[in-house]
């Protein structure tokens, strides 16, 4: 275990990413691959993506691998020896690797090993290697059924009832502790409802988009459970990636920030966007009885702190972002990958 040292507050890493060495866990996944796209554009000298390829795909890295500055390592973040090797000599770590929320519920011990133990080990490795900054993916799931809207970062985490949300809260707590004990600089980002190209086709909160696109493509009506007034704060993956870059290059440290748009989109609104984009305008919705187990029925992000501390404002609205998603999905629908995922 690293020795405690006198802590100097304030980020030791700020500004230009050119010439840096970066590690991205979950690097060939949905969000990690988009972060890598921006890191390549920023002129990083070497970018290492580590991924166990359960949710990630080499295809997600596309042109990034062709740059000659990205190296994809197939490995498990629970492999301490591997992670020690990858962290050594790294300037900034973007920790994106995680299990999906449904897998956390079905395999809780595995989830703890990946989401909690492996995160602890990674942070310990970062301290030992002298990493300048960690940017970690957290989630709005920590809020559970929020009591106030828009929801600020000061909202308590005690209504969360998912293991996924609990693990994300624990990860945030580890970061605070490591900052106090060892001076490890960090920013944690609570993503709201992420969507866009390369997204998880079986995600609990975004699966509805995939199912609706499939039904609309087949000339069927989207199925809405209940009245359709449940809302999400949809934030496009490219905006999320930009928030990660801003977190790394800003002077902000020892802080947790929301990443969202501050705009609610109901399921009815979402269906309307998709029907128009897919040329099915006027397709009626098929309402069915509300499910007994309902995910969080409302999400609305307070965006002010992220704007104040790192200058982040989401730029992609729902109409533009969903058009981007549909174009990607239509391309993916021609591939065996999507057909297998929907089987």
Image (tube, rainbow, N blue to C red):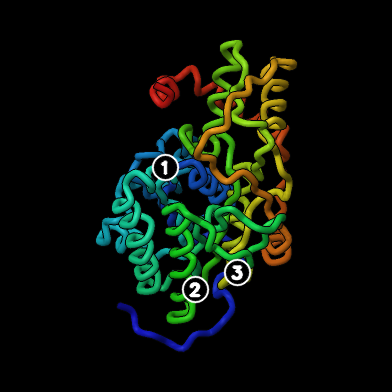
| CA gap, disc 2 and disc 3 | 19 Å
Numbered circle sitting on residue 311 = none
Q: Compared with residue 330, is residue 18 higher up or lower down, i.e. above or below?
A: below
User: Going 57% across and 46% down the picture, which residue do you hit?
Assistant: 296
Quarter containing the N terminus: bottom left
Q: Name which of mark 1 and mark 3 comes first in the sequence.
A: 3
Q: Answer few, some or many: residues within 10 Å of disc 1's Cα (few below 14, many 20 plus, some between 14 and 19).
A: some
Q: Quadrant of residue 122?
A: bottom left
Tag 3 residue: 14
Q: Say whether residue 46 is visible.
A: no
- Judged by depth in the image, the label closer to the viewer, 2 or 3, is 2
Tag 1 residue: 102
Left or right relative to 189: residue 28: left
Q: Say whether residue 298 is visible.
A: yes
Q: In x, y percent, where is residue 221?
A: 62, 16
Q: Name which of mark 2 and mark 3 comes first in the sequence.
A: 3
Q: Quadrant of residue 258?
A: bottom right
| CA gap, disc 2 and disc 1 | 27 Å
- Judged by depth in the image, the label closer to the viewer, 2 or 1, is 1
User: Going 36% across and 66% down the picture, which residue do you hit?
Assistant: 120
Q: In x, y percent, where is residue 9?
A: 56, 81
Tag 2 residue: 176
Q: Compared with residue 149, is residue 123 higher up or lower down, i.e. above or below?
A: below
Left or right relative to 220: residue 229: right
Q: Answer few, some or many: residues within 10 Å of disc 2's Cα (few below 14, many 20 plus, some between 14 and 19).
A: many
User: Going 39% across and 21% down the picture, which residue do you hit?
Assistant: 343
Q: Name which of mark 2 and mark 1 comes first in the sequence.
A: 1
Q: In x, y percent, where is residue 160?
A: 51, 56
Q: In x, y percent, where is residue 157?
A: 54, 63
- Relative to the observer, which residue lies in front, 117 or 269? 269
SS at mark 1?
Answer: helix
């Amino acid at each position: 275990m690293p020795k405690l040292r006198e802590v100097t507050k304030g980020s030791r890493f700020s500004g230009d990413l050119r010439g840096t060495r970066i590690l991205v866990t979950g690097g060939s996944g949905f969000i990690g691959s988009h972060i890598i796209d921006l890191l390549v554009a920023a002129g990083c000298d070497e970018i290492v993506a580590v991924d166990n390829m359960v949710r990630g795909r080499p295809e997600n890295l596309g042109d990034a691998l062709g740059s000659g500055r990205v190296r994809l390592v197939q490995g498990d973040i629970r492999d301490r020896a591997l992670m020690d090797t990858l962290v050594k000599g790294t300037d900034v770590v973007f920790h994106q690797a995680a299990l999906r929320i449904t897998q956390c519920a079905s395999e809780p011990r595995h989830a703890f090993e990946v989401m909690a133990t492996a995160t602890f080990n990674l942070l310990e490795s970062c301290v030992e290697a002298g990493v300048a900054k960690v940017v970690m993916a957290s989630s709005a799931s920590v809020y559970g059924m929020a009591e106030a809207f828009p929801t600020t970062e000061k909202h308590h985490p005690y209504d969360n009832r998912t293991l996924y949300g609990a693990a994300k809260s624990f990860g945030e707590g580890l970061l605070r502790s490591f900052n106090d004990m060892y001076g490890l600089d960090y920013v944690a980002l609570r993503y709201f409802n992420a969507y866009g190209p390369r997204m998880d086709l079986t995600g609990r909160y975004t699966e509805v988009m995939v199912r609706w696109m499939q039904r609309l493509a087949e000339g069927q009506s989207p199925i809405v459970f209940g009245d359709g007034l449940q809302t999400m704060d949809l934030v496009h993956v490219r905006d999320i990636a930009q928030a990660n870059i801003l977190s790394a290059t800003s002077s902000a440290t020892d802080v947790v920030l929301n990443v969202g748009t501050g705009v609610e989109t109901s399921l009815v609104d979402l269906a309307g966007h998709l029907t128009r984009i897919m040329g099915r305008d006027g397709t009626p919705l098929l309402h069915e009885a509300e499910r007994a187990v309902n995910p969080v029925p409302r999400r609305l992000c307070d965006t002010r702190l992220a704007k104040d501390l790192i200058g982040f404002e989401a730029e992609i609205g729902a109409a533009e972002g969903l058009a981007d998603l549909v174009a990607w999905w239509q391309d993916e629908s021609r591939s065996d990958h999507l057909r297998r995922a929907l089987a």
